[in-house]
Image (cartoon, rainbow, N blue to C red):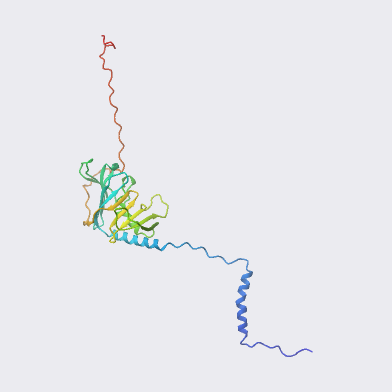
Amino acid sequence: MYDHRPARRLPASLAPALAAPLLLALPVLFAGCSADPPAEPPPSSAPRPVGMDAARDELAALAAAAQDRHLVARYTLRVDGASDRVITVTSGNDGSWRVDVPGGALGGAADISLAATADGLFQCALPSATRPEPASCVRLGERDDTLPRRLDPRVQHPFTDWLDVLTDRRAPLSVSPAAAPPEATGTCYSVETTAASINPPLDVGIYCFDADGTPTAVRAAFGTLALAAPPEPAPATVQLAGPVIEGEPLDMTAPPVEPEAPADVPGDQTPPGDDATGTA
């Protein structure tokens, strides 16, 4: 005998409840049958230490303050194997600047001054014990031109164009806090370049500033500069050390030494006609 009673149907209210788990399970089943596993997320680069970012920001702020700091300041320059020298830095209120460098040319035999004004970039030869001539200046080019290496004493850069690099967050630099060099004050930072370059944007080293932006010390390839006395008020503009003349600038290196002429060798002073015995 067959049961001719109609099949029992689920109540309408239970159908969605049973269908939902089945729909959720289907993606899991298909994922298990997939031939290609899901791609792994690309590795992320390691974050920079927070302290390095903070140091970079602090140094950029101090360098920006230094760009607005106009003064007359004297720095002691210490170089291994040489006597200390006093470098005078003048930053005029109009943006002009001048840096006097004793022994800055001819291998230390000549004192010079570098200056940038509205009229251009100049090198001035200063009178000294070895060169008593009056000061005179030669125009090197426009005020923002780059000095050729043969004319560049480099000590002027921490007060001029290297400040632009320190304020530029796009420059390839690594900055970290550092201890001040001996006899120096201020807040100091170690600066290194992070990209290999034949002409790096600045010298790696230690850069120190007071809170008002006064550069207090620099240790770089050229030696160590340390503020020697409190800064003095800035002039409205810098003055060149002497008149501008037509001529050649002084090179950094000493000129070649010309060999001395050989001394005359005394010859035979025997009078003609005399022999070794002195007979005629």
The picture places residue 41, in percent across and down from the top left corner, at 53, 65
The relative height of residue 190 versus residue 257 in the rendered view (above or below) is below
Residue 277 located left or right of residue 200: left
The picture places residue 165, in percent across and down from the top left corner, at 35, 56
**Residue placed furthest toward the bottom:** 5
Q: Is any atom of residue 62 visible in this view?
A: yes
The picture places residue 85, in percent across and down from the top left corner, at 26, 47
Quarter occupied by the C terminus: top left
Q: Is any atom of residue 123 visible in this view?
A: no
| Picture residue at 61% right of the left edge, 78% below the top | 23
Residue 85 located left or right of residue 174: left
Depth check, front residue: 190 or 56: 190
Residue 72 located left or right of residue 206: left
| Picture residue at 39% right of the left edge, 62% below the top | 51
| Picture residue at 39% right of the left edge, 54% below the top | 192
**Residue placed furthest toward the front:** 182
Depth check, front residue: 114 or 191: 191
Depth check, front residue: 190 or 255: 190
**Residue placed furthest toward the top:** 280
Quarter occupied by the N terminus: bottom right
